[in-house]
Each structure stands twice: as structure tokens, then as C-alpha cells.
């Protein structure tokens, strides 16, 4: 995934990209009302679900194909680009026929390589100009599996899509939590480390599941350098047929977007540079210290071997751990953090000593 293009030609990279619109397209009137309000709030990409994957049967499963006409009308009357979710070959063909500009692959679909490949095969057959202008966003799979997420994007990239992006929408988990879907930020951060050119859009609506979490989650994602946001917006959220607890009005959305602090991309100030130099030096020192500690551990290993002593001495380990943790807390270090580091250093010492002992 190396030759990516910007998702949209209008992008300047200065402000985060924002896609907004209702969870579902419910009626022509609801769609048009939201679209007009969002367009006047400066939104350039309108989202709405036409086919809705519901956990259980009996809920509102989307209007289906007829709703695509309403999206086409949004594009015609407001000039916004239009985005919808596709989960199979038929959805993809129908959405493309109606002129949808942005397809997204939902979290339940990106977990299924058969479905993603089916979509990719439709895209691979598009004429080059259509493929060139089409943007595809791939939501993370519901389960926290970064390889599955990457694999889904590779299938779409393999079909020739170059306007490709990832959407971080959180991961499902058992039981009740603050978030509807746990953010597990380290996963999108790792994705960014592996594919620095790939735009990542945060979906605070599906992560939070609640209106009041949209603003803080959006800010957090911008602080972590995400490229944009996809936010569910409905003119009458309490009456929404799906995801009503997490939808906000276009006015609330405009207010949130105005109050977000956009981190500066260009100015790495001099003092930040100096602080980073200090971190570089400290990390070098940490590594040297660790190497020194392992050398001493190996000396101890040799001594234990000569004197026929066991490598593991649990009594000593427990006492040592508690004493270190107490000291660390006095230094204002987090207890769990220190415990994890010490446990992992100890594990490596034991591994090295066992290696010595087993060598004759
Ligand atoms: C949606 O965006 O409305 C949606 C169904 O999202 P997800 O696939 O993230 O659950
Ligand atoms: Mn939704």
C-alpha cells in the first residue's frame, strides 16, 4: 500500500477531513434536511447508511436501494460528495451506479475476507477514471485484529483503489464499559507506524456510543494526529431509527468542530526538539543499563551453575519485586507500569541463565 493518493482532491491537510451524516438514510426528507444543514456547516462529504447490519433481526435494517436516489439528490443539490456502506457485490454495484463517491466497508464486513474480496473484485473491473476518483474507507474489524484490518485494505488496494483510508471505530468486547467499542488506541497507532501514508479517520460516534463522548474522543484522535473524523449527525437524534444515543444535530457538530484544537503539523518548536534530544539520550542510557544488568545476570547464572543452585528462587523474586515497586512509587512512577517492566526484565534474566545452565 505504497502508492496512495489523497482521499479527496479538495484536501489541504491543514484541517481534519470531516465526513458527517445520519447513521441511516430513513426518508428523503430526513436525508435532505440533514444534508442541507451539514453543507451549510461546511461539511464536504455526506455519509448515510443505506443497508444497515443489525446485530439481531427485527431492527431497522435500512431502506436499501431506493435510498441511493436520496443520496444522489444530496450530491446534486448540495454539491457534497456522498458516502455509504457496502457489504457485498450487489451493494457495491448499486452504489457505484448511483454515483456514490466514497464507499466504506463496515466493521462486520472487514472481518470477513470473502466479503471484502467480493467487493474488491467488483472494484477491479471499474473503468480507470472511475477507479481513480473513488475513495474507499475500511473500518477496523469488530475484533482487535490488526492483520485482518490490513488484509482487508490490501484486498481493496489490490483492486487498484488508490484513494484508500482506514476508519478506527473501536473494538467490541464483552460486558459494560464506558465506551460502546473500546478504542485500543495502540492498534491504529501501530497501523500508522506500519503504513505512514495511509490516512486514518476516527469514528467517535461508534467508539463512544454516546453524544457526550463525541467531542473528547474527536479531540483525542486529533491530538494523536489522525487525519479526519466521521461523525453521525441527525436533525432529530432522539427520533433516529438507528444509533440514536450517539447522533448529534448538525448544529452541535458545527460547534464541536469549531472548538476542536487542531495540533500544528509544521512547527516542531525548538524547545520540543531539545526535549526530544533528551529523550533520545535517556533511551540510550536505559539500553546501556539494561545490557549491563543482563551481563551481571549471566555472571550470577554461571555462579549458580558452578554451585549447582537452581536458577529460579521465588522467595527472592517476590521480596525484590516489592522493594523495587515501593521505591518506584516514591519516585512517582505508576505501580503497574513498574511491575510490568520489572517482570519482563526478570523473565529475560531467567531465560538467559537457563540458557547458560543448559549449555554444557
Ligand atoms: C455505521 O457507520 O453506521 C456502522 C454500521 O458502523 P460500524 O461498521 O462501525 O459498526
Ligand atoms: Mn451507526
Image (cartoon, helix red, strand yellow):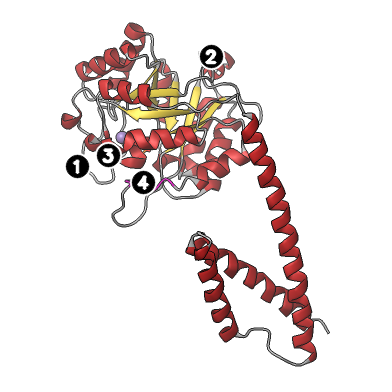
Would you name the residue on which mark 4 appears? Answer: 181
Q: Earlier in the sequence, mark 4 or mark 2?
A: 2
Q: Is residue 87 above or below residue 305?
A: above
Q: Secondary structure at mark 3?
A: loop
Q: Earlier in the sequence, mark 1 or mark 2?
A: 2
**Circles 3 and 4: CB atoms closer than 8 Å:** no
Would you name the residue on which mark 3 appears? Answer: 210
Would you name the residue on which mark 2 appears? Answer: 9
Q: Earlier in the sequence, mark 1 or mark 4?
A: 1
Quarter of the rendering containing residue 61:
top left
Q: Residue at x 21, y 21 (%)?
A: 27
Residue depth check, mark 1 versus mark 2: number of the one nearer the observer? 2
Q: Secondary structure at mark 2?
A: loop
Per the rendered image, the range of residues in magenta is: 179-183
**Circles 1 and 2: CB atoms closer than 8 Å:** no
Would you name the residue on which mark 1 appears? Answer: 58
Amino acid at each position: 500500500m505504497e502508492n496512495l493518493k489523497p482521499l479527496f482532491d479538495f484536501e489541504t491537510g491543514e484541517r481534519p477531513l470531516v465526513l458527517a451524516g445520519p447513521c441511516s438514510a430513513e426518508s428523503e426528507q430526513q436525508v435532505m434536511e440533514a444534508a442541507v444543514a451539514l453543507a451549510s456547516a461546511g461539511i464536504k462529504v455526506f455519509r448515510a447508511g443505506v443497508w444497515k447490519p443489525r446485530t439481531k433481526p427485527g431492527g431497522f435494517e435500512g431502506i436499501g436501494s431506493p435510498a441511493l436516489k436520496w443520496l444522489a439528490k444530496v450530491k446534486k443539490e448540495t454539491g457534497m460528495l456522498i458516502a455509504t456502506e457496502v457489504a457485498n457485490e450487489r451493494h457495491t454495484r448499486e452504489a457505484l451506479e448511483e454515483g456514490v463517491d466514497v464507499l466504506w466497508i463496515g466493521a462486520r464486513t472487514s472481518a470477513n475476507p470473502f466479503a471484502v474480496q467480493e467487493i474488491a473484485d467488483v472494484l477491479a473491473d471499474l473503468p480507470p477514471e472511475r477507479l481513480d476518483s473513488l475513495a474507499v474507507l475500511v473500518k477496523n474489524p469488530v475484533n482487535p485484529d490488526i492483520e485482518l484490518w490490513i488484509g482487508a485494505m490490501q484486498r481493496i488496494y489490490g483492486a487498484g483503489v488508490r484513494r484508500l483510508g482506514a476508519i478506527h471505530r473501536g473494538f467490541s468486547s464483552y460486558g459494560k464499559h464506558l465506551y460502546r467499542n473500546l478504542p485500543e488506541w495502540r492498534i491504529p497507532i501501530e497501523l500508522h507506524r506500519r503504513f505512514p501514508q495511509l490516512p486514518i479517520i476516527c469514528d467517535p460516534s461508534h467508539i463512544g456510543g454516546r453524544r457526550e463522548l463525541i467531542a473528547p474522543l474527536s479531540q483525542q484522535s486529533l491530538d494523536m494526529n489522525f487525519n479526519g473524523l466521521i461523525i453521525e449527525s441527525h436533525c432529530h437524534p432522539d427520533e433516529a431509527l438507528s444509533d440514536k444515543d450517539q447522533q448529534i444535530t448538525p448544529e452541535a457538530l458545527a460547534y464541536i468542530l469549531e472548538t476542536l484544537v487542531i495540533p500544528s503539523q509544521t512547527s516542531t518548536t525548538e524547545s520540543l526538539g531539545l526535549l526530544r534530544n533528551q529523550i533520545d539520550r535517556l533511551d540510550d542510557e536505559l539500553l546501556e543499563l539494561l545490557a549491563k544488568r543482563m551481563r551481571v545476570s549471566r555472571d550470577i547464572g554461571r555462579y549458580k551453575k558452578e554451585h549447582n543452585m537452581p536458577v529460579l528462587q521465588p522467595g527472592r523474586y517476590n521480596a525484590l519485586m516489592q522493594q523495587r515497586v515501593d521505591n518506584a512509587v516514591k519516585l512517582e512512577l505508576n505501580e503497574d507500569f513498574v511491575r510490568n517492566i520489572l517482570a519482563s526484565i526478570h523473565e529475560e534474566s531467567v531465560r538467559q541463565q537457563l540458557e547458560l545452565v543448559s549449555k554444557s
